[in-house]
Image (cartoon, grey):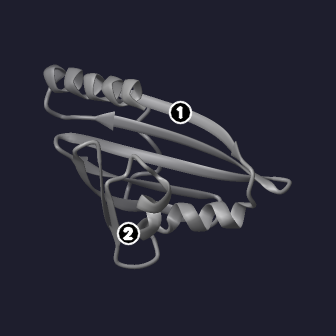
């Protein structure tokens, strides 16, 4: 597939880390069950996968008016998953890592957004990201 991580030089790069009071197996199962995302992620409008996520599989989801087809670039259950794809001129890459911490799980996420359509479109990416942050 060629993609091994987020694009560190992209117009937008975001990172977050948080601790969830649940074992890593449960967190991984919830996170990779795309068809149930809408039951626990209020920002996700639709989500569909043909089956369990695996290397090369594509799943479809929508959020905040973006309709996204994401392809799994790397998967190391239950520790790491990397996916990405285009959405309305934006190419996003999203990496999630999971680390057991006793009976809890530390989740680290990194995401990059880029476009090949020039500086004007990069400004739109930054504006859209800022709007998403403000509205959350």
As measured in the structure, the alpha-carbon distance from the residue carrying label 1 to the one carrying label 2 is 24 Å
Res 25 quadrant in image: bottom right
Q: Which residue is at a point 51% across and 65% down the rendered structure image?
A: 32
Q: Residue at x 56, y 64 (%)?
A: 30
Query: Which quadrant is the C terminus positioned in?
Result: top left
Where on the picture, by quarter, is residue 108?
top right
> Would you say residue 9 is visible in this rendering?
no
Q: Secondary structure at mark 2?
A: loop
* 77 relative to 42 in the view: left or right: right
Q: Residue furthest bottom?
A: 51
Q: Earlier in the sequence, mark 1 or mark 2?
A: 1
Which circle, 1 or 2, is nearer the viewer? 1
Answer whether residue 19 is visible to the viewer in this image: yes
Q: Is residue 105 left or right of residue 46?
A: right
Q: Position of residue 106 (x, y in %)?
A: 71, 46
**Residue furthest toward the right?**
102
Q: Residues within 10 Å of mark 1 (few under 14, many from 20)?
A: few
Q: Residue 36's spot in the image, x, y percent?
A: 45, 67
On screen, residue 78 versus residue 72, left or right, reads right
Q: Which mark is residue 45?
A: none
**Residue picked out by circle 2:** 56
- At horizontal 37% and vertical 29% (from top left) the residue drawn is 135
Q: Which residue is mark 1?
A: 15
Residue at point 29%, 23% (across, down):
126
In this view, the residue in front, 60 or 92, is: 60
Secondary structure at badge 1 equals strand
x, y percent for residue 115: 22, 34
The image quadrant where one finds the N terminus is bottom left
- Provide residue 58's location: percent of width, then percent of height: 32, 67
């Amino acid at each position: 597939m060629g993609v091994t991580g987020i694009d560190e030089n992209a117009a937008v790069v975001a990172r977050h880390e948080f601790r969830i009071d649940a074992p890593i197996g449960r967190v991984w199962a919830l996170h990779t069950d795309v068809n149930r995302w809408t039951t626990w992620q209020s920002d996700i409008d639709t989500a569909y996968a043909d089956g369990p996520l695996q290397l090369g599989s594509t799943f479809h989801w929508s959020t905040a008016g973006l309709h996204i087809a994401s392809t799994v670039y790397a998967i190391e259950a239950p520790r790491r998953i990397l996916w990405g794809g285009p959405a309305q001129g934006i190419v996003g890459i999203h990496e999630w890592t999971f680390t057991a911490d006793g009976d809890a799980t530390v989740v680290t996420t990194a995401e990059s957004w880029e476009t090949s359509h020039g500086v004007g479109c990069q400004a739109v990416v930054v504006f859209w990201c800022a709007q998403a942050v403000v509205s959350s």
